[in-house]
Amino acid sequence: MFEKEVYVNRRNRLQTIVNSGVILILGNNDSSMNYPANSYHFRQDSTFLYFFGIDLQGLAGIIDVDNNRHILFGDGYTLDDIIWMGPQSSLVSKAERVGIPEVLPFKKLFEVVGDAIKQGRKIHFTPPYRGENIMLLSDLLGLDYRWVKDYASTSLIMACIELRSIKEPIEIEEMERHMEVAYKMHTTAMRMAHPGVSEQEITGVIEGISMSRGGMVSFPVICSVRGETLHNHYHGNILKTGDLLLVDAGSESPMHYATDHTRTIPVGGHFTAQQKAIYQIVLDANNKAREATRPGAFYRDVHYTACRTIANGLKSVGLMKGDIETAIQEGAHALFFPHGLGHMLGLDVHDMEDYNDTLVGYDSEISRSSQFGLRSLRLGRRLKPGFVLTNEPGIYFIPALIDNWRNEKKFEAFINYNEVEKYKNFGGIRLEDDILVTSDGARILGNRIPIDVEDVETEVAKKR
């Protein structure tokens, strides 16, 4: 965890923004795989980590705004706990490390919340996403479990978004330090990308790299020669010459800050002329989008920069035609680029999306589009220094989507379907960096993972 003052300051700032009522922040518990004692790897709730900092099960925190009380709820360790887990420092000492002066048994949470309700005070909580916390909130607040999420506090959500969107220097340091692990994961995948190797073997090795550096993967690894499927978690293919291997993988630091990168790799180490042409278009989109990322810019405009680069590039190779600006406004380019340019990154790989991704990515200045492709842009609002984002343009040839649009005669003025047919076995290319918005622009966090054509081919040739 960070120094005590970090958590004290965060809670105090939150208390200032949410200026009345009781703020209730629940931690997570173990989730069982197939029976209670066999659980998935524990992952603490990110909001609880941000404000209370303690990475343990069975906890809840309250910030009583009206009475200026910060309380940690949890139970002490039993002898059985010590037998199975080893000696543990007391909950009181853990609370002291994050500046919480008051520790109460977990059952007291019902009393404190109940008293506040009787007094007619507002109980603020963020939308729960785990079943056990939905049921706990139902019991605490006397609500039907089916409607608990509807009572989540918008004022608390917006306060959390305001605070967490701008990363503190210590957060940036933690994220940048862990970028070395991401570099190792992706360069290892490049060196393993040779004929006869399985997707599963590469996936296992790069997951192991993340674990060996004290964290876990920040999301299930995407490692596939069928990169046209955006979130492809099938790892059963054997690599062969001519394949493009798309690897989208990230690691969590020991303090749970995420990395998220994508590279697309020529199996065996050499892009074909066709692959190289499409790859360069995506790389140009990545670079131009980063150059357009700066304080004050709407990220939707940065997304459009990537779209324009992709559409012009596809026109140059004969896959699109006509007036490109009109094509983009009407959404014709989304046949090839059906997702958004990027998203927030931090304690979550899609940072804060448990609150509501539209509230995180949009505001009173800009609203979310309903247009295919553009509606998948998770972040559209004006950028500020301290935002950490992903920058991940891509080009994909999705046979089902191509057939659907062609049969509907969709955007025939902009798409050269006869040429597109020749690419239906191509797959997909995505290139993703993690970037920090600075006072005058943006920069890549960590050393950039090899991305230029020659550098990727050189890395593959090194072998593992």
Image (spheres, grey):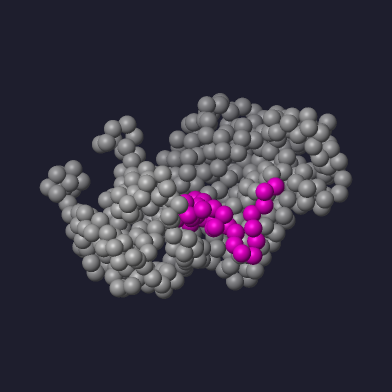
x and y percentages locating residue 384 in the rendered image: 58, 67
Q: Main secondary structure of the magenta part?
A: loop
Q: Residue at x 31, y 73 (%)?
A: 68
Res. 136 visible in picture: yes
Is residue 352 a member of the stretch shown in magenta?
Answer: yes
Left or right: where does residue 245 sit relative to residue 72?
A: right
- Quarter of the rendering occupied by the N terminus: bottom left
The residue lying at 48 percent from left, 40 percent from top is 220
Q: Is residue 205 above or below residue 386?
A: above
**Which sits in the foreground, 88 or 338?**
338
How far across and down, in percent of the image, does residue 41 sit? 35, 42
Residue 446 part of the magenta-drawn span: no
Quarter of image, res 52: bottom left
Residue located at (42% from left, 48% from top): 147
Which residues lie in the magenta part? 344-371
Residue 13 visible in the shown view: no
Residue at coordinates 31% horizontally, 43% vertically from top-left?
30
| Near-viewer residue (123 or 17) | 123
